[in-house]
Image (cartoon, rainbow, N blue to C red):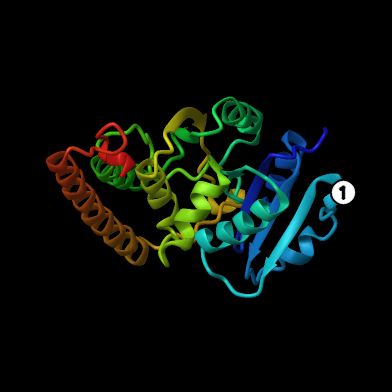
């Protein structure tokens, strides 16, 4: 497979367990290049990846000294990707939840619509925990409200293709979006900046601990983080609506009067 010069797979990883190698291997079989960002893991991930790390063969490993969260790991990759000339990154989890067989299709859609973000829309199976499904429905409602129903689909699903520079500008403008608030806030703020979403249905797996599944989501801590994020985004929407009202009053509506573009 000839490595792409524009589209890159990024896999942020923190103590992902034994499924990490399988995920990276399958991603590399579907696409090249693949970058793995080891986000301060303490489970020997960096050493386990050594046999696979070969930039000439399409796999590179970025080691972060300290754990900073998914968004922080993605930001490191975005900076390096932009410097290397990549225009888009597909971000996927390292724990086997996301389908490597869908990478090529997602990348093709991104290449055909480079100004848009390609967002995976999860198809849940019987293995999906009900509490996770109900909680994301609430997050999806608020994300729809914050973008005036721009069509994000699933606000928390992390299997996505992002345009590098718009996302990089957004992340450099805030100190948030570094942990579990990354996925939802990235989707909302990209809509605000004029990057429209394309939703693609993809299957998702929830693996048990016996199957090697690992989750670092903490219901109390991270639900508070997500709640604070939505309060912040709702305040941002109100500011944009006031700005739009002011523009209309002066006869300068900006981007066709659409507040998601303000």
- Dividing the picture into quarters, in which one does residue 198 lie? top left
Q: Is residue 65 above or below residue 107?
A: below
Disc 1 is placed on an element classified as helix
- Compared across the picture, whether 54 is left or right of 5 comes to right
> Residue shown at 43%/38% (left/top)?
195
> Residue shown at 38%/38% (left/top)?
154
Quarter of the figure that contains the N terminus: top right
Is residue 144 shown to the viewer in this render?
Answer: no
> Residue shown at 37%/62% (left/top)?
222
Q: Nearer the viewer, residue 83 or 176?
A: 83
Residue sitting at the far bottom: 65
Q: Estimate how packed mark 1 is, as few (under 14), some (14 to 19) or many (20 or more) residues with alpha carbons within 10 Å.
A: few
Q: Nearer the viewer, residue 168 or 33?
A: 168
- Compared across the picture, whether 1 is left or right of 90 comes to right
Which percent across, then down, holds residue 105?
61, 26
- Dividing the picture into quarters, in which one does residue 142 lie? top left
Is residue 196 shown to the viewer in this render?
Answer: yes
Q: Which of 172 and 101 is in front in this view?
A: 172
- Compared across the picture, whether 159 is left or right of 32 comes to left
Q: In this view, does 144 lie above or below 50?
A: above
Residue sitting at the far left: 249
Residue carrying label 1: 56
Which percent across, then down, holds residue 89?
61, 44
Which percent across, then down, holds residue 37?
66, 59
- Dividing the picture into quarters, in which one does residue 58 lie? top right
């Amino acid at each position: 497979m000839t490595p792409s010069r524009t589209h890159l797979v990024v896999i942020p990883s923190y103590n992902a367990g034994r499924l990490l190698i399988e995920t990276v291997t399958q991603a590399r079989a579907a696409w090249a290049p693949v970058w793995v960002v080891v986000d301060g893991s303490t489970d020997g991930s960096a050493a386990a990846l050594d046999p696979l790390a070969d930039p000439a063969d399409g796999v590179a490993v970025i080691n972060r000294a300290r754990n900073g969260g998914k968004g922080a790991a993605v930001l490191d990759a975005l900076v390096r990707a932009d410097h290397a000339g990549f225009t888009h990154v597909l971000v996927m989890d390292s724990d086997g939840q996301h389908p490597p067989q869908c990478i090529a299709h997602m990348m093709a859609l991104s290449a055909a619509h480079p100004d848009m973000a390609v967002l995976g829309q999860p198809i849940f199976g019987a293995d999906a925990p009900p509490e996770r499904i109900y909680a994301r429905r609430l997050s999806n409602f608020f994300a729809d409200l914050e973008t005036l129903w721009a069509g994000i689909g699933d606000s928390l699903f992390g299997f996505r293709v992002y345009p590098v520079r718009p996302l990089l500008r957004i992340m450099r403008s805030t100190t948030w979006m570094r942990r579990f608030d990354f996925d939802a806030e990235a989707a909302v703020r990209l809509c605000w900046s004029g990057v429209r979403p394309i939703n693609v249905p993809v299957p998702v797996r929830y693996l048990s601990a016996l199957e090697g599944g690992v989750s670092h989501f903490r219901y109390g801590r991270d639900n508070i983080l997500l709640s604070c994020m939505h309060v912040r985004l709702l305040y941002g929407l109100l500011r944009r609506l006031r700005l739009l009202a002011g523009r209309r009053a002066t006869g300068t509506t900006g981007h066709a009067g659409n507040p998601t573009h303000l």
